[in-house]
Amino acid sequence: MVKTFFEWLNNQLLRMEWLDKIIKWFFSEIVKIDETSLLFKSITFFFYDVIKIFILLSVLIFLASYIQSYFTPERTRKILSKFKGVWANIIGALLGTITPFCSCSSIPIFIGFTKAGLPVGVTFSFLISSPLVDLASVILLASIFGWQVALAYVLVGLVIAVVGGTLIGIFKMERYVEDFVLANGNKIELDDVEEQTLSKKDRVEYSWEQVKEIINRVWIYILIGVGIGAIIHGFIPQTFIEIILGDNNPFSVLLATIVGIPMYADIFGTLPIAEALVLKGVGIGTVLAFMMAVTALSLPSMIMIKKVVKNQLLFMFVGIVTVGIIIMGYLFNAFSYLLI
């Protein structure tokens, strides 16, 4: 009974199966589109995913932002300063999941952490995990692929962040951070930072502001992503997709990673594309590799990072994350039977 209850909650609250039925009923009975047509498949996919994502996203951003209000950059710096070694990297990666920044907006946080005297390896663990894994994206992933895949994605993202930051620390790559970031005259002392105290009302207002700000920033990517997903779902033959990105192509994960790097979108914009690809028979590891590449290694974010680090550190960062994503993709494909 408990399992049945939670399955019902997952299907109705996260997957919103009721919404899918309403959308299909509307376009078949009211608009009179043939249910067997390619247009019907595409248009119902588009409207269902757009409405579902915006509903879930608004609720999840509000909840995540309310939690995030307890973890200001000042508090995060203080927490990280108390840990050393690999534990600091683990805490940095975990805190990155609580702070839903895209890779570009994480750069000012990276500068602040570095100026505060935190190890560069620790700040990179935060920088990798922040755009890659956050609370809202985990629940959205669960709504599409199930909790096993969502939790496995989180675990892999954290491992990549911890390993990447640890290696950067071991090889003492702080010497390749731009001088203006490490300038002694600009160093921030943690004890001198006054932590802001917010009331419950302030936190609610902050959370609503975050909902409006993030929705305003990502809505176009969501519409584009759902549009691409709808085209893939309705009009591109499954055999064509399987030839390029199917399990029979040994380079599918590598290809998906390379294709994802030049793009720039939040994870919310890539989810509809990922959903459509999975429905077309693409391996879950290939799809998740594409999503990770878009969110963690997009060309615009690399340009931003290049402004604060030198080529040696940039290449090491890209290399570690790319290798981690590719390994993750092939492992997910190999053991997908355990997750789905």
Image: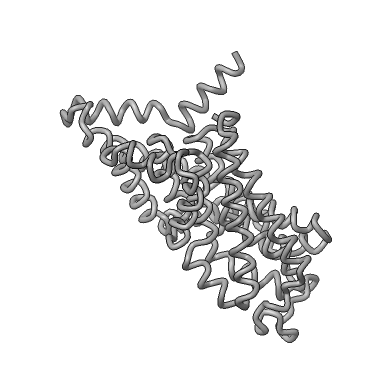
Q: Position of residue 174 (x, y in %)?
A: 73, 74
Res. 65 in view: no
Report the colour scheme. Answer: one colour
- Occupied quadrant, residue 202: bottom right
Looking at the rendering, in which quadrant would you find the C terminus? top right
Q: Position of residue 336 (x, y in %)?
A: 56, 33
> Viewed as shown, does residue 7 lie left or right of 42?
right
Q: Position of residue 245 (x, y in %)?
A: 42, 44
Res. 278 in view: yes
Q: Position of residue 199 (x, y in %)?
A: 64, 54
Name which residue lies at 51% across and 28% down: 10
Say above or below: 6 vs 202. Answer: above
Query: Which is nearer the eye, 75 or 273?
Result: 273
Query: Which is nearer the eye, 280 or 4?
Result: 280
Query: Which is nearer the eye, 316 or 195?
Result: 316
Give the farthest residue toward the bottom. Answer: 185
> Viewed as shown, does residue 102 lie left or right of 168?
left
Say above or below: 135 vs 181. Answer: above
- Occupied quadrant, residue 85: bottom right
> Viewed as shown, does residue 336 lie left or right of 125?
left
Name which residue lies at 50% across and 41% down: 140
Looking at the rendering, in which quadrant would you find the N terminus? top right
Say above or below: 104 vs 138. Answer: below
Say above or below: 12 vs 111. Answer: above
Give the farthest residue toward the left. Answer: 32
Name which residue lies at 56% across and 59% down: 101
